Structures are given as C-alpha cells and as structure tokens.
C-alpha cells in the first residue's frame, strides 16, 4: 500500500517511472481500476482499516488518525494506553479500537492459525489496522527505538522475534541518515519545473536528516526509510518461510514515505517524484524476489489521495488554502459563548471533529445549532455537521452521506468539520499539504493487481474501494470479512480448492 497515492497523483507520476517499473508493469499489464472511498474522513487510519475490513468507519469504528482525549489532547487511534512499544515505553500500539474483522482475521480462522500474517510499515497504524485482531505480528518504525519494532500486544513478553533482532543488528538506521540528492535532476526539471516551489515546507535539494532537530524522526521522510522498510519486509518473508507451503500467507507492506514526503513538499515536487522512483525501484526488486519463490498475487493501492499545495492551486486559477485549528477553535468558542453565555463549552478539536465538554454535551442541540450557523464564516470552512445525527447516512445529499459513513453511532466527537474544496487542516505554519476531506482528489485512488489468479482488466466506471477486501479474500481463497461487500473487483479469479 502506497500511502497518499491518489489516482490523479499516479497519473502525474507514471511518465517519470522507468519502463521496467513494477508500478508501470501493473498499470499496463495487470488489472487496473479507479476506485473511491465511500466516506469523508480520508485519513490514513480509516483508509487502512477499510481496505481489509471492507467496511466504512461508521462500521469499523476507526474515524480518524487521532481523536480528542481530555488528558492527552490528540490521542492516536491505535494508542490503547496498555500495550507499550518495545524500545519506547511511552508509546502504545494495538488494534483494540477496530470493531470489524479483517481479511487477515478470516485467514487466521480459516487456516486454523497456520497462515503467516504480517503487517509492516513505517507508521504504527498502517501496520496494525490492516491485519486486524489476530495477526502473527505488526512491525513498524519507532524514532525512540531507532529501529523497526513492535508492541507488547504482539510480543507480550517484550521480546522481539528472532528475525527482527537479526535484521536490526544487520541493518542499523544510523548509517542511513544520509544527505538526500535527486537521482536525475534533469528529468525532474523537464517534467516538473524548478525544484523549490512556494508552499513547500523546506528548501530545495539537498536535504540532510542530520540537520533536523530529531534526525531519527526525520529519517521517516527520506527514501532510505522506504528502502529500509522493504528490506525488512523481505527479511520476514524469508525468516517465516512465507509462500512456500499449501497454506496461503498474507503480507501487508505499508509504504509511508510517499505520505510523509507528500505532506512536506507536495506531490508535484521533485522530492515526491524522486522518492517514488526509489520506492518503485525497491518494490520492483522485492516483487522479483517474491515471484522467484512461487505463486504470488499483488494488490497495490492507496489509503487516500491528497490536495495540491494551495500556492500551486491559486497559481493555476484554482481555490485552496490552509485552515488553522486555532482559528477553528476560537470561532467555535466565540459562537458557543454567544449562544449559551460565557462558559467552557468546547473541550478540543482534532481533525475532523470538535468534542464538547460535559457542559457542552448537556446543551448539544442548542450548541450544535449555533456552531452550524457560525462556523461556515471561517475562511475555508464549507459546513459542519452534528456528528451524532444517524440520519446523515441515509440522506439524499451526497456530502451528508459521505460524512455519515464516517461516523459510528457513538462517534469520538460531536461536530464534524468539512472544508471547502482545495482547503484542508494545516499541518504546519511553514506550508505543506494535507488530505482528510470528502472531495474527489482525496477519495480517489488507483487499485493495481497482478500475479497469480489476476487477469488483465480495467473498469470504465469508478469502483468502490471497499471491494479490495473481498478481492484479497478471493486471492487467499477464504470468505470475505463479515462487513465487506460480497464481490471482488474485476480481474480476480478465485483459486481452486
């Protein structure tokens, strides 16, 4: 899975990939579909959960990357405050908030626990959520541990598996903290124009993570991190002997670098293009190694798209901008005071949800009515919705249905914020871009499939991305998850028993 790979992004980047690229091979010779997420909260955690449960956030319960917590402020969806990360006792990771079974859960059950199931990514949520409640292991990078690791949910005794210990010893991160230079500046100049563009968070090439306040954290946004991730993925394939017996195995590789680089420099940047070329080169080698081991099927997609940098959008005559959380909170607090009197009504905001205090919840209807009237006056805000209104899911309005599909009956907040097209929640005062909206550029992603049991197919119509889950199930020869659609995407042939 390539994080932040929207359909429009792939269209833009394909000409920059070499002819022997695995991504181009999949696009030109495999099954290729344009698909859309049928909900509004297009963030990483909901996307990864939806792809293998086949359900919307209203069902699987993962509404956003983080939710408001009275003590922590923003609390990550996979932070259960219980299962500590090995090597970082202040961080916690588990899939405990996920309410729907995944394809991996079904595979575990149908194989009587014999299938090898692994999720691996730079981000914790990207490794954990796709493999569900009963995986073999989820592995991710931690900047405090300075390495790939896991949590005590998967290793209750606090001991890493032998293959991971061996990989860490053989592949320390520190030598990978290197200056990043583009591999083909001339080609990037030809296709994308000048290196530095308004709105990018950092200057032009070169970039050195060692110059960052925390080099171990900055490492996540370099091509070396993605190459390190893919090397770790092959290490577990070899160590666990995945794909060499009659029991199908499931490996989910979440390439986070595309998202991190995209947020900082935008997807029309030299950095995004150079990073994707290096990821594609590593994936091409990885795929060839796996194909040499025996029959294997691949599904490549994105967890969401992204908006272009507002500066680029406005230069092209399109609208766009960044909505500051401070401006949103101030406007909400002022509107609440005007409607209810001076008081403590708003507990906090973590995109896309405002959470009310106990006093605010006691006046939910009146407070929500006031905010629905006032918040669209904030520049970049289109509208807000009552997050506790179940009628949104069955509305005749497309936008309301998308928002409703993002919210379970007990949402982790009270008011859902929708920005105008081209606008998004600001990540930094320095610039950059984001996703998380219901607009087409955030919901549309490519789905590419090739390998065993895949035939050449394309779709004229846009597909429902939730069909990826039954597609994976068909390739693994197991039933689809309980909350997923029944039919796989076109191009998949169920393997014989």
Image: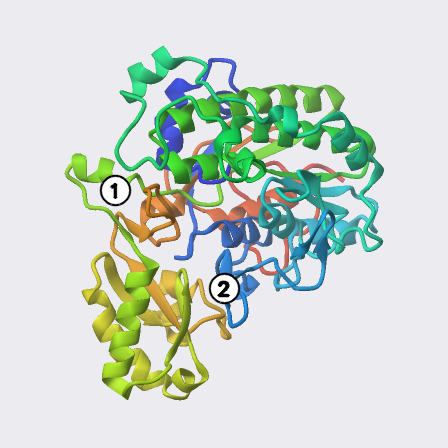
Disc 1 and disc 2: Cα gap in Å?
Answer: 26 Å
Q: Residue 289: in sight, yes or no?
A: yes
Q: Where the C terminus falls, by quadrant?
A: top right
Q: Residue at x 47, y 34 (%)?
A: 258
Mark 1 highlights which residue?
310
Q: Secondary structure at mark 2?
A: strand
Q: Where does residue 280 sit, x and y in percent of width and height?
A: 52, 23
Q: Which mark is residue 392?
A: none
Q: Image quarter for residue 170?
A: top right
Viewer-proximal residue among 306 and 494: 306
Q: Image quarter for residue 77?
A: bottom right
Q: Where does residue 86 sit, x and y in percent of width and height?
A: 74, 49
Relative to 460, is 295 on the left or the right?
Answer: right
Q: Where the N terminus falls, by quadrant?
A: top right
Q: Residue at x 29, y 72 (%)?
A: 332
Label 1 or label 2, whichever comes before in sequence order: 2
Task: Tell me if residue 415 comes above or below residue 236 in the rendering.
Answer: below
Q: Residue 244: in sight, yes or no?
A: no
Viewer-proximal residue among 11 and 315: 315
Coloring scheme of the render?
rainbow
Mark 2 highlights which residue?
67
Q: Residue at x 32, y 79 (%)?
A: 368
């Amino acid at each position: 899975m390539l994080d932040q790979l929207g359909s429009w992004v792939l269209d833009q980047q394909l000409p920059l990939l070499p002819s022997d690229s695995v991504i181009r091979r999949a696009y030109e010779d495999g099954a290729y579909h344009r698909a859309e997420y049928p909900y509004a909260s297009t963030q990483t955690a909901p996307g990864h959960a939806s792809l293998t449960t086949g359900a919307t956030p209203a069902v699987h319960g993962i509404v956003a990357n983080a939710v408001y917590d009275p003590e922590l402020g923003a609390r990550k969806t996979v932070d259960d405050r219980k299962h500590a990360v090995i090597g970082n006792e202040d961080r916690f990771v588990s899939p405990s908030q996920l309410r729907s079974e995944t394809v991996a859960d079904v595979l575990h059950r149908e194989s009587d626990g014999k299938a090898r199931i692994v999720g691996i990514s730079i981000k914790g949520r990207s490794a954990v959520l796709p493999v569900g409640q009963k995986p073999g292991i989820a592995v991710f990078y931690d900047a405090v541990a300075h390495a790939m690791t896991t949590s005590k949910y998967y290793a209750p005794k606090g001991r890493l598996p032998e293959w991971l210990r061996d990989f860490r010893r053989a592949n320390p991160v520190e030598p990978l903290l290197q200056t990043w230079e583009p591999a083909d500046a001339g080609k990037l100049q030809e296709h994308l124009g000048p290196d530095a563009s308004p709105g990018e968070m950092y200057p032009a090439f070169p970039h050195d993570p060692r110059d960052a306040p925390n080099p171990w954290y900055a490492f996540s946004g370099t091509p070396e991190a993605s190459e390190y991730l893919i090397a770790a993925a092959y290490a577990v394939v070899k160590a666990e002997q995945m794909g060499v017996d009659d029991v199908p195995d499931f490996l989910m590789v979440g390439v986070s670098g595309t998202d991190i680089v995209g947020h900082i420099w935008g997807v029309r940047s030299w950095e995004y293009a150079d990073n994707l070329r290096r990821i594609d080169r590593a994936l091409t080698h990885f795929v060839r190694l796996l194909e040499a081991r025996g029959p294997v099927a691949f599904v490549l997609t994105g967890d969401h798209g992204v908006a272009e940098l507002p500066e680029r959008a406005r230069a092209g005559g399109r609208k766009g901008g960044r909505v500051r959380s401070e401006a949103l909170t101030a406007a909400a607090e002022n509107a609440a005071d005007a409607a209810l009197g001076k008081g403590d009504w708003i507990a906090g905001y973590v995109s896309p949800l405002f959470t009310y205090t106990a006093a605010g919840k006691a006046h939910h209807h009146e407070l929500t009515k006031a905010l629905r009237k006032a918040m669209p006056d904030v520049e970049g805000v289109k509208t807000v919705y009552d997050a506790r209104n179940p009628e949104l899911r069955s509305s005749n309005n497309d936008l309301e249905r998308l928002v409703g599909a993002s919210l379970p009956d007990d949402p982790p907040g009270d008011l859902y914020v929708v920005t105008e097209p081209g606008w998004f929640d600001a990540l930094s005062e320095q610039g950059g871009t984001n996703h998380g909206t219901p607009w087409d550029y955030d919901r549309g992603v490519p789905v590419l499939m090739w390998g065993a049991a895949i035939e050449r197919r394309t779709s004229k119509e846009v597909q429902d991305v939730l069909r990826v889950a039954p597609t994976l199930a068909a390739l693994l020869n197991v039933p689809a998850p309980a909350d997923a659609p029944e039919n796989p995407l076109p191009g998949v042939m169920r393997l014989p028993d």
